Image (cartoon, rainbow, N blue to C red):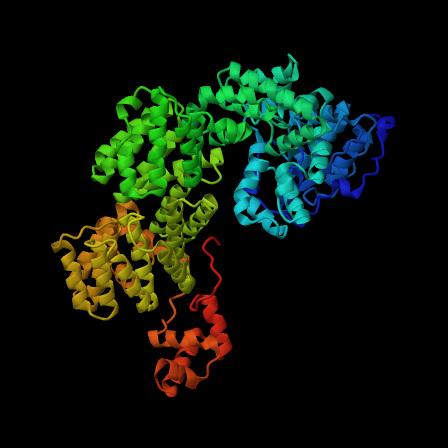
């Protein structure tokens, strides 16, 4: 380097070499910070993703934690070679990890630094001598256009001084030797998939941006945005402006469209933008469809280019490739296309419908026919494929298609009327289904096909399941012609309906085998709805048999299917959520139980079917029991009572479900000292589950609560002596623990040991922790004292005790006596003490004693505070119900 080549450094704005300050709504991401920490020893770190993925925020958060060892440079489009390297040297000069005497602090910048090997060698030698490596962060590297700058960075990487780690963030892959670094294992890459926000991170972000986005919408928001951080922030801003996410989800928010246009689409060429608009009409674009929609033979090549890892405006996968736009971009491109060019939108949908029909893909062919407005094509596709689409779970597409045809054209076809009825039943709408059945009967042909005949039998059977009760459902299932059904696509569904007769006879083994065969055949035929129905039934059978791990596994498989199909209102989804809520409660995870129970109300909506009402009320019981265990004792107990009273009496629900409700409510009522509610629960259950072990168990509980240990033990012994089978397999665990308490109270330690061992032995296979995690303190004290002597039950006991410690729920309050409850109910009436005494036919002094007891137990000092606290705890009736809250 000669003297005339040396120039002073260009003046560099301070902000260009300063780590950016974090945004106010920063969501720190420990999982990514740990990844960067672990990869800091690599020669190079590449953080690559399109705009809005939080690259700068992440690196700034990371760099701020490593101050003194970071030189930060923000690249700009105006940077030439000399300005960039001047910024690098300025960043080095501001880095505390580089000593004052190091040559990089005083190095001048030559006229062409990227090509000056002596200049680059001086930098390499300077950082090589550092005691600890320095991170050189180049943020926004896609802005660098000067080839000399990239040549200089390539030279620096080729020599790779040990004191330098290069960290690049860019919207596209930089012209650096990434492939060589990958092969050598000297590159850490953080791409789109890692940068997406998880539901937990999205929930944190939404929580920092104020109201407008309910917590239950976070998962949907993550799905719609693909976890894109900028999309989540735009959603939060949209919700703040409009009070909800309706405009955001519909593609109507102008601010979101402007951001997508300026940040995502602007860097693309005009042909690329036109191609994206054309394919935006499809959720997924199989290989070959893009060319048909855009009339461009090079469409596939363009999509592959747009799908490169760093930019990834298009997501591609599979062989042959299938392409998808990011969900939010697709929504806004589609909405903008419809606003500006409705005719072109319809013609694109028509072209897509033809392409899908030619490739034997009836579901998307039908959907795009609907969107093109071609009712003739819609009718043809429905007549040909409606049954297969119903079995395949394409219910939303079928509903859209039937709506386009309208009532008059739909009901004139028995096939379409029956399919419509079947769809109505899956949403819990029996009245609408009956109307469609009547239309099918009116239009019934003289010589119906086997498929049409069996479909009508299946719809009638499903109607009985949903709204007629178990006895009528069994009769309707028996009327299905299995032999006729065997020669149609409906054979598997007919078998599923008839399996109910096996379970009614308790022939569960045969039922499970038959269900497994039907499910396997359904999967092979892509009959996803039928396969899912089999899994739901298998999950229910497993729960009834006490195979709770199997129940939970199957229910989660169904839940995953529902999440993929976005089913909205669905009896099937609600049924699975009940199973998941029950499984969570049995595992002792009361908080998860509450969340599943909340989902059920949203799935059922206002569905009038008897099955929907029963599922909703069962969910309320489970939610109340979970809330009780989480410390909401009074509100949880009140929720269970409301659910039970709404269930009423009779056999509109199974004895098993009645036993659930009674066992959970009776247990909570006794623990809180609500003896009157416990008696009421027992009387309600007695005629419904007569002869069951659960009734004896509730009697034993009551005797123990009254201090009659001998009577409790006697009742428990009769459980094995009498013909009183348990309806709920987990109830046997509860009975053993009641036996532990009764034995301890009677001083019979050896009997207590045997009962505890029985409980642990029964609970461990199904992972039933609920009776232990929420057991009274005397059981826990005894269990703890037995540690080290429990043999095979030792590990399970330790897990239970650890889970109990993590809960940190407050101890149950001292319960109000029945007399105190009676006085409390009259406090809001503003009656005087004397008037209350007269109403209750006791002396005023007695009322005063009860009032003092109420104040002490509620920790209040006045009548007004007592009423307010009692209302808050659910001790007083109010007119405000929270069945769906």
Quadrant holding the N terminus: top right
Percent across and percent down for residue 374 are 58, 22
Q: Is residue 106 visible?
A: yes
* Residue 755, above or below 230: below
Q: Residue at x 48, y 23 (%)?
A: 382
Foreground pick, 498 / 697: 498
Foreground pick, 129 / 526: 526
Q: Residue at x 47, y 76 (%)?
A: 829
Q: How many marks?
A: 0
* Residue 148, above or below 750: above
Q: Quadrant of residue 337?
A: top right
Percent across and percent down for residue 63 are 64, 43
Q: Quadrant of residue 765?
A: top left
Q: Is residue 378 left or right of residue 632?
A: right
Q: Is residue 857 visible?
A: no
- Residue found at the very far top of the displayed protein: 297
Q: Is residue 137 left or right of residue 601?
A: right
Foreground pick, 870 / 391: 391
Percent across and percent down for residue 29 are 57, 44
Percent across and percent down for residue 588 are 36, 52
Q: Residue at x 81, y 25 (%)?
A: 112
């Amino acid at each position: 380097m000669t003297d005339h080549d040396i120039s002073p450094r260009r003046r560099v704005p301070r902000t260009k070499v300063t780590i950016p300050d974090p945004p106010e709504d920063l969501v720190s991401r420990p999982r990514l910070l740990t990844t960067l920490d672990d990869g800091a020893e690599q020669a190079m770190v590449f953080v690559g993703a399109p705009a809005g993925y939080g690259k700068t925020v992440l690196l700034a958060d990371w760099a701020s934690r490593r101050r003194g060892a970071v030189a930060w440079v923000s690249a700009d489009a105006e940077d030439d070679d000399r300005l960039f390297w001047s910024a690098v040297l300025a960043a080095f000069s501001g880095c505390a990890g580089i000593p004052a005497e190091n040559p990089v602090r005083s190095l001048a910048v030559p006229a062409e630094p990227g090509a000056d090997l002596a200049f680059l060698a001086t930098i390499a030698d300077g950082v090589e001598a550092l005691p600890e490596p320095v991170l050189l962060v180049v943020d926004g590297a896609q802005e660098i256009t000067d080839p000399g700058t990239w040549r200089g960075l390539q030279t620096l990487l080729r020599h790779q001084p040990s004191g330098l780690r290069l960290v690049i963030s860019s919207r596209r892959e930089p012209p650096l030797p990434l492939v060589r670094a990958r092969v050598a294992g000297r590159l850490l890459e953080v791409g789109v998939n890692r940068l997406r926000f998880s539901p937990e991170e999205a929930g944190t972000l939404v929580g920092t941006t104020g109201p407008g986005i309910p917590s239950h919408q976070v998962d949907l928001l993550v799905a719609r945005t693909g976890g894109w951080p900028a999309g989540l922030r735009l959603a939060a801003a949209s919700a703040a402006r409009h009070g909800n996410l309706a405009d955001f989800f519909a593609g109507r928010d102008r601010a979101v469209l402007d951001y997508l246009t300026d940040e995502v689409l602007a860097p693309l060429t005009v042909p690329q933008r036109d191609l994206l608009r054309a394919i935006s009409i499809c959720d997924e674009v199989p290989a070959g469809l893009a060319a048909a929609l855009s009339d461009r033979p090079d469409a596939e090549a363009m999509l592959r280019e747009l799908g490169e890892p760093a930019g990834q405006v298009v997501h591609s996968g599979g062989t042959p490739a299938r392409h998808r736009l990011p969900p939010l971009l697709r929504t806004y491109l589609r909405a903008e296309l419809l606003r500006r060019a409705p005719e072109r939108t319809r013609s694109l949908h028509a072209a897509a419908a033809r392409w899908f029909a030619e490739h034997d893909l009836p579901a998307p062919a039908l959907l795009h026919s609907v969107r093109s407005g071609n009712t003739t094509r819609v009718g043809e596709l429905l007549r040909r494929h409606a049954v297969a689409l119903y079995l395949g779970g394409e219910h939303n597409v079928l509903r859209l298609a039937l709506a386009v045809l309208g009532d008059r054209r739909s009901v004139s076809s028995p096939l379409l009327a029956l399919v419509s009825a079947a769809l109505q039943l899956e949403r819990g709408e029996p009245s609408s289904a009956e109307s469609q059945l009547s239309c099918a009967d009116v239009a019934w042909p003289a010589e119906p096909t086997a498929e049409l005949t069996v479909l009508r039998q299946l719809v009638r059977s499903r109607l009985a399941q949903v709204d007629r009760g178990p006895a009528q459902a069994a009769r309707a299932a028996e009327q299905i012609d299995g032999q006729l059904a065997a020669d149609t696509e409906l054979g598997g569904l007919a078998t599923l309906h008839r399996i109910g007769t096996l379970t009614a006879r308790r022939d569960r083994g045969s039922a499970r085998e038959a269900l497994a065969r039907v499910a396997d055949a359904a999967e092979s035929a892509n009959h996803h709805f039928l396969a899912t129905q089999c899994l739901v039934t298998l999950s229910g059978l497993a729960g009834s048999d006490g195979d709770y791990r199997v129940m939970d596994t199957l229910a989660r498989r169904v839940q995953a299917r529902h999440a993929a199909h976005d089913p909205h209102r669905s009896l099937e989804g609600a049924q699975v959520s009940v199973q998941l809520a029950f499984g969570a409660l049995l595992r002792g995870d009361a908080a998860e139980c509450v969340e599943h129970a909340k989902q059920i109300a949203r799935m059922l909506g206002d569905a009038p079917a008897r099955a929907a009402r029963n599922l909703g009320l069962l969910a309320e019981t489970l939610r109340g029991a979970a809330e009780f265990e989480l410390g909401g004792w009074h509100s949880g107990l009140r929720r269970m009572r409301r659910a039970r009273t709404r269930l009423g009496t009779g056999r509109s629900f199974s004895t098993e479900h009645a036993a659930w409700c009674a066992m959970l409510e009776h247990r909570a009522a006794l623990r809180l000292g609500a003896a009157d509610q416990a008696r009421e629960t027992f009387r309600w259950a007695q005629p419904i589950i007569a002869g069951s072990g659960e009734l004896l168990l509730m009697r034993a509980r009551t005797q123990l609560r009254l201090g009659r240990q001998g009577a409790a033990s006697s009742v428990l012994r009769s459980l094995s002596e009498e013909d009183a089978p348990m309806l709920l397999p987990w109830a046997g665990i509860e009975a053993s623990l009641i036996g532990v308490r009764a034995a301890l109270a009677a001083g019979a330690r050896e009997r207590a040991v045997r009962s505890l061992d029985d409980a642990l032995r029964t609970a461990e296979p199904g992972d039933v922790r609920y009776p232990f995690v929420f057991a009274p303190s005397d059981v826990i004290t005894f269990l703890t004292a037995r540690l080290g002597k429990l043999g095979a039950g030792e590990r399970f006991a330790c897990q239970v005790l650890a889970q109990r410690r993590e809960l940190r729920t407050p101890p149950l309050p001292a319960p109000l006596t029945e007399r105190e409850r009676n006085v409390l109910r009259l406090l809001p009436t503003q009656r005087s003490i004397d008037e209350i005494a007269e109403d209750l036919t006791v002396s005023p002094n007695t009322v005063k004693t009860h009032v003092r007891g109420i104040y002490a137990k509620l920790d209040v000092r006045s009548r007004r505070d007592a009423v307010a606290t009692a209302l808050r705890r659910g001790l007083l009736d109010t007119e405000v119900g929270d069945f769906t809250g």
